[in-house]
Image (spheres, rainbow, N blue to C red):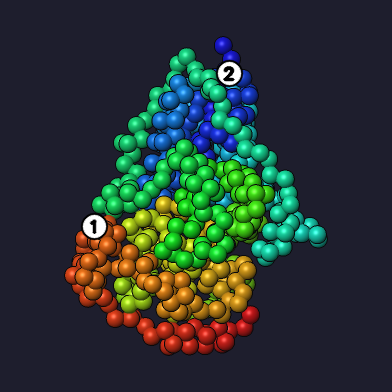
Amino acid sequence: MAKPVIWWVRKDLRLSDNRALKSAIAAGGPVIPVFIWDEVFETYGAAARWRFGLGVAALARSLEAMGTRLICRRGRAEDVLTALVGETGAKAVRWSRAYDPDQVARDTGVKSALGSLGVDAESLPGHLMFEPWSVETKTGGFYRVYSPFWRAVAGRHVTEPLPCPSMIPGPDVWPVSEDIASWNLGASMQRGAGVVSQHVVVGEDAAKARLGEFVDKRIEAYKDRRDFPSEPATSGLSENLAWGEISPAQCWHAARRSVEDGSRGGEHFLKELVWREFAYHLVWHTPHILDRNWREGWDAFPWRRDAKSPDVLAWQQGQTGRRFVDAAMRELYVTGTMHNRARMIVASFLTKHLMTDWKIGQAWFADCLIDWDPASNAMGWQWTAGCGPDAAPYFRVFNPDGQLEKFDRDGQYSRRWLAENETNPTETALSYYNAIPEHWGLSACDSYPDPIIELAAGRARALDAYSNRSF
């Protein structure tokens, strides 16, 4: 019988449009799908660990429905894979390519170790539409600004998504699998898991349905209405893209068809997909964007770096006294996500009005987001803080009250998430108190907090800091 091929499952939790899976099947012989909770995934925050685990379990169910199974192991990726090769006699390993430095380092070590054993180890594209090294400026360098990056790729061919395979051949004898439930990946979520679980949309089938519903009903108004947080105007697909339950190519072609059908919002959605690509383009070429100021000259900027200050705690708890900021931070705790306009507002408030280092906000999002993505999270925070790519004007300070008046004039969004001083608080606002740590000691019966800073004073302090530094 032909030797098996291991399909190393990572953040590509889907069967359709999966080139690594296709390559594993094409290699001939049985395919052994393997998921490893490895040294990289061990570093993930509470919400990401929990949500990733849900996605893995959904993929396992899909594989079982096809008459095969998912082998789950925990440990250092190189050690687990070399052990599995020894157990199964596998001749090859296939996986979807990654681009952030932690995963690249892991994958490089794995490929070297497998190669020394005579195993055919290969990574395939699938997480992005455009490989970062394939998009170059006219002078041969990488792009540092989004707009020309968009123009460079907008007309490029994106390969049509692959269909789901009709069958995945399995081995006669399967290696032993660990029980993913025993890993208790949601332990750090504590009681919040029960609340956030009401808002997740898990798995490949659900992701495809979500994309279809968006294209059929909402993409037309996407450009005009996507900044209004009380409206269901966005796709919600960041959660599914983060874990590979749907591919960017699947989203691209669905939106492209809507553009061809005359949709006014379709092109803007395509631009948002390319913004995600741009984030990974920068991570590949300038990996320091993940943990250091991207722009030179910002290391001495006088941000406050006390992650346990009263101001930071008030921001984390949604207790700043600014309704847009507080509503958004509570939305994050209840749903594990946050509207994109709101993400900009809370990031601006923390880094500019409160003059707090963007890395403190980045870390909080990494712990709380179910759609956490290392590239998008880092670029978003640095863009808003002013020290990142495309952050022009870097001295722009969002006024959260003005933004609320512009994008939530009737107060639907803020009432959805803020319970204090409301005669009949919404269920979503009350659910915040069931999700937060009990030791915070917060109650819906409390009075809404006074502002922790006056907006004019905070803005003036930030602008003074900007004006007194050299760029």
Give coordinates of residue 26: x percent, y percent. Answer: 63, 24
Please tell me in which quadrant of the rendered image residue 286 appears: bottom right
**Front position in the image: 161 or 394:** 161
Above-or-below relation of 13 to 225:
above
Q: Is residue 320 left or right of residue 382?
A: left
Q: In the rendered structure, which amino acid carries the disc numbered 1? A: Asn
Q: Nearer the viewer, residue 198 or 395?
A: 198
Q: Amino acid at mark 2?
A: Gly
Q: Is residue 409 visible?
A: yes
Label 2 CA crowd tier, 10 Å (few <14, some 14–19, many 20+): some
Q: Residue furthest right?
A: 139
Between label 1 and label 2, give the one nearer the viewer.
Answer: 1
Quadrant for the C terminus, please. bottom right
Instruction: Residue 96 in the image: state x and y as whole percent.
Output: 58, 39
Question: Is residue 131 rendered to the left or right of residue 408?
Answer: right
Considering every residue shown, the one lying at the far front of the view is: 262
Precedes in sequence: disc 1 or disc 2: 2
Is residue 188 in view?
no
Residue located 43% across and 88% down the image: 457
The residue that mark 2 highlights is 29
Name the residue: 46% across, 71% down: 407
Q: Name the residue at 35% across, 44% down.
A: 185
> Tag on residue 57?
none
Residue 434 tag number: 1
Q: Helix or strand or loop: what does disc 1 sit on?
A: helix
